[in-house]
Image (spheres, rainbow, N blue to C red):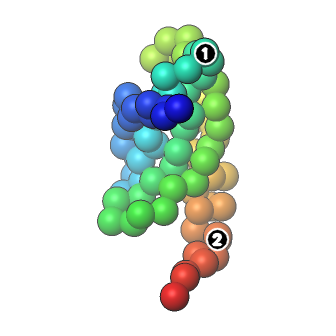
Amino acid sequence: MEKQIKVIARYYYKRDYFVEVSHEDSYTKSRDYWLCKRGSARKLFMFSSPFKNAPTEERMILKKISPCIERYENTVSIRTA
């Protein structure tokens, strides 16, 4: 069985960072929030949460983005040969 995961929103932030919001077509109503940086293939999982409304979603992202950026910048990439 194949799952359908759709990117449903992007919130742009400073220094080329943005948060990609995805939703899986399944029984859950949760959205996944991923920290991304323009020009990089890396993504950092931030959190999951059910959608309430846009202002609440924006507040949750702003509350969590700074520590996630720090984690993103300090994570060592593992390269495969």
Question: Crowding near pointer 2: few (<14 within 10 Å), some, many (20+)?
Answer: few
Q: Residue 13 appears at what percent x and percent y?
A: 41, 46
Query: Looking at the picture, which amino acid does disc 1 mark?
Result: Tyr
The quadrant where residue 74 appears: bottom right
Residue closest to the eye, 62 or 11:
11
Q: Residue 59 appears at what percent x and percent y?
A: 56, 26
User: Which mark is drawn over residue 18?
Assistant: none
For marks 2 and 1 on the same chain, the one whose residue lies earlier in the sequence: 1
Q: Mark 2 points at which residue?
A: 74
Q: What element carries label 2?
A: helix
Q: Can residue 59 be seen in this view?
A: no
Q: Whole-Å distance between the Cαs marked 2 and 1?
A: 35 Å
Q: Is residue 44 visible?
A: yes
User: Which mark is drawn over residue 27?
Assistant: 1
Residue at position x 53%, y 45% in the image = 34
Q: Is residue 68 above or below residue 19?
A: below
Q: What element carries label 1?
A: loop
Q: Is residue 42 above or below residue 81?
A: above
Q: Nearer the viewer, mark 2 or mark 1?
A: 1
